[in-house]
Amino acid sequence: MDTLSFKTKSATPEIIKRDWWVVDAEGQVVGRLASKVAGILRGKNKPYFTPNLDCGDNVIIINADKVKFTGNKVTDKVYLRHTGYPGGQRETTPKELLQKKPEMIMEKAVKNMLPKTKLGRAMYKKLFVYAGAEHPHSTQKPKTLK
């Protein structure tokens, strides 16, 4: 009996090809959109996905100020941060963030879905979030993601 042996090939930096994607966040639910974007940043949509390499694409998110939250999360959800000083814990709600820095909501959601390592930080650098419909990356000829 002749057995076939298949070897799994790992991606190498020479194989990796990075694309640019534009995602319109208007009317999208934050968590569902963030999980799709995090998968693209990791490279999980590629056939040569390798967990220990950064083989993901660059992602541009536009209209980040028009995202939706389900349920009462707009008022009930709390984002915590710390200033570094004693008693310096600060909290904000998505409603406040949508008024001040709407990009932060998508950035935080995607960043928390990436690995918490050097590799995850390198993946996060390929994310670009803009509140409006315009972005300065038109020279990269990004494709639109449905």
Image (spheres, rainbow, N blue to C red):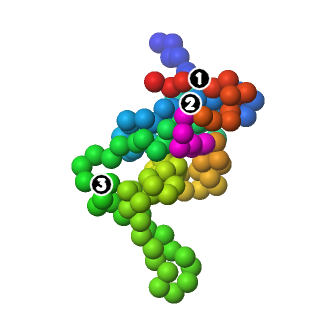
- Name the residue at the top extreme: 1
Kindly identify the amino acid type of the residue bearing the numbered disc 2.
Val
Q: Nearer the viewer, residue 127 or 6?
A: 127
Residue 22 got which mark? 2
**Between marks 1 and 3, how big is the CA–CA gap?**
31 Å
**Count of numbered circles on the image:** 3
Location of mark 1 (residue)? 143
**Between marks 3 and 2, how big is the CA–CA gap?**
26 Å
| Element under disc 2 | strand
| Element under disc 3 | helix
Residue 36 got which mark? none
Residues drawn in magenta: 127-133
Q: Nearer the viewer, residue 76 or 117?
A: 76
Magenta-colored stretch includes residue 130: yes
Give how far across and how far down residue 34 sits, in percent.
45, 42
Magenta-colored stretch includes residue 125: no
Q: Is residue 107 left or right of residue 71?
A: right
**Between marks 1 and 2, how big is the CA–CA gap?**
6 Å
Residue drawn at the location 51% of the way across and 74% of the way down: 82
Of the numbered discs 3 and 2, the one sitting upstream in the chain is 2
Location of mark 3 (residue)? 73
Of the numbered discs 1 and 2, the one sitting upstream in the chain is 2
Residue 20 visible in the shown view: yes
Residue count near mark 1 (Cα–Cα under 10 Å), binned few <14, some 14–19, many ≥20:
few
Q: Are marks 1 and 2 in contact (CB under 8 Å)?
A: yes
